[in-house]
């Protein structure tokens, strides 16, 4: 094989790979630029609404949402049936308790 054929093959591979990643999105980014910054989640836990400060989160094609809590460090799975995501801190009437550091 000549260097020209190898270079053309690598170029085609790079184009196909970048197109696949660009069209599929990454993490919470969709093709339509539907990327949201969610800072808080109110999750129903034992019949109480608990406010968590979100360190990171990801959704899926189903009703699931997963997030890592900034205060306690837990990685939590929730559903649209028992969680509400907020960009800014919600009003106090939206939750019963707030997640705090462990040991407090």
Image (tube, helix red, strand yellow):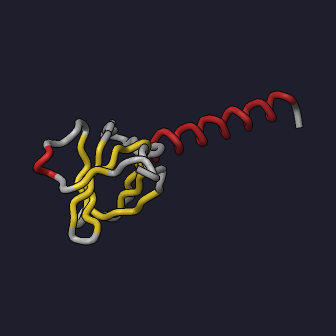
Q: Nearer the viewer, residue 74 or 65?
A: 74
Q: Position of residue 97 (x, y in %)?
A: 24, 54
Using the rendered image of the protein, determine whether residue 24 is visible from the camera's viewpoint: yes
- Please give the name of the residue rendered at 73% of the width and 32% of the height, measured from the top-left corner: 8
Left or right: 98 as drawn, with respect to 103:
left
Q: Position of residue 14 (x, y in %)?
A: 65, 36
- Please give the name of the residue rendered at 73% of the width and 38% of the height, measured from the top-left corner: 9
Residue 1 higher or lower than 61, as above or below: above
Q: Nearer the viewer, residue 37 or 89?
A: 89
Q: Which quadrant does the N terminus fall into?
A: top right
- Please give the name of the residue rendered at 42% of the width and 49% of the height, measured from the top-left corner: 69
Q: Quadrant of residue 45?
A: bottom left
Q: Position of residue 25 (x, y in %)?
A: 45, 43
Residue furthest to the front = 104
Residue furthest to the right = 1
Residue furthest to the bottom = 46
- Please give the name of the residue rendered at 43% of the width and 42% of the height, measured from the top-left corner: 55
Residue 51 higher or lower than 55, as above or below: below
Residue 11 higher or lower than 69, as above or below: above
């Amino acid at each position: 094989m000549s260097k020209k054929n190898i270079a053309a093959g690598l170029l085609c591979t790079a184009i196909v790979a970048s197109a696949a990643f660009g069209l599929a999105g990454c993490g919470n980014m969709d093709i339509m630029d539907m990327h949201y910054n969610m800072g808080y989640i109110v999750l129903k836990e034992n019949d109480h609404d608990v406010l968590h400060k979100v360190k990171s989160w990801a959704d899926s094609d189903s009703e699931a949402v997963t997030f890592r809590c900034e205060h306690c460090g837990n990685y939590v799975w929730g559903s649209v049936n028992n969680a509400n995501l907020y960009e800014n801190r919600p009003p106090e009437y939206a939750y019963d308790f707030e997640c705090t550091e462990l040991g407090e």
